Amino acid sequence: MCVTLIGGMDRLEKEYVAAAADAGHSLRCITKNERNFVQKIGHPDALIVFTNKISHEAKRKAVQLGRSKKIPVQLVHSCGVSSLRDCLSKTQGN
């Protein structure tokens, strides 16, 4: 399953990817609102947004994209690796 993570900390990106690989997912990390933000999200099976480390505009774009393409979106305030593991375990159930 391909998951896109929006937000989080740059220094934890390797840990995020490792935690996703342990859970059997491939993970793409986008840590900030960049040019062509929506195109960089791509077509994942699920979106996880760490809301405390991303701009309101980026969060709004991600939620809007998820709704338009019927992609499940999880909004999480914390941005730790354990929060990502919790989200990935919920994603597996879907």
Image: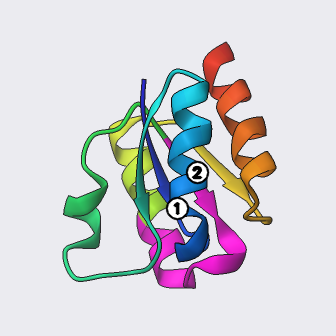
Residue 39 in the figure: left or right of residue 76: left
Residue wearing tag 1? 13
Q: Quadrant of residue 75?
A: bottom right
Residue 52: where, in percent of width, then height?
Answer: 72, 77
Q: Residue at x 63, y 27 (%)?
A: 91
Of 84 and 76, which appears nearest the observer? 84
Q: Quadrant of the C terminus?
A: top right
Residue 65 in the figure: left or right of residue 49: left
Q: Are marks 2 and 1 in contact (CB under 8 Å)?
A: yes
Of 55 and 80, which appears nearest the observer? 80
Q: Which residues are magenta?
A: 47-61
Q: In the rendered structure, which amino acid carries the disc numbered 1?
A: Glu
Q: Residue furthest top?
A: 93
Give how far apart the Cα atoms at labels 2 and 1 are: 5 Å
Q: Residues within 10 Å of mark 2 (few under 14, many from 20)?
A: many
Q: Residues within 10 Å of mark 1 (few under 14, many from 20)?
A: some
Where disc 1 sits, the SS reads helix
Tally of numbered tags: 2
Of 71 and 91, which appears nearest the observer? 91
Residue wearing tag 2? 16
Q: Is residue 91 visible?
A: yes
Q: Quadrant of the N terminus?
A: top left
Q: Main secondary structure of the magenta part?
A: helix
Q: Is residue 50 magenta?
A: yes
Q: Residue at x 72, y 27 (%)?
A: 90
Q: In the rendered structure, which amino acid carries the disc numbered 2?
A: Tyr
Q: Is residue 43 above or below residue 49?
A: above
Q: Is residue 67 above or below residue 63?
A: above
Q: Residue at x 68, y 15 (%)?
A: 93
Q: Is residue 54 magenta?
A: yes
Residue 40 in the figure: left or right of residue 2: left
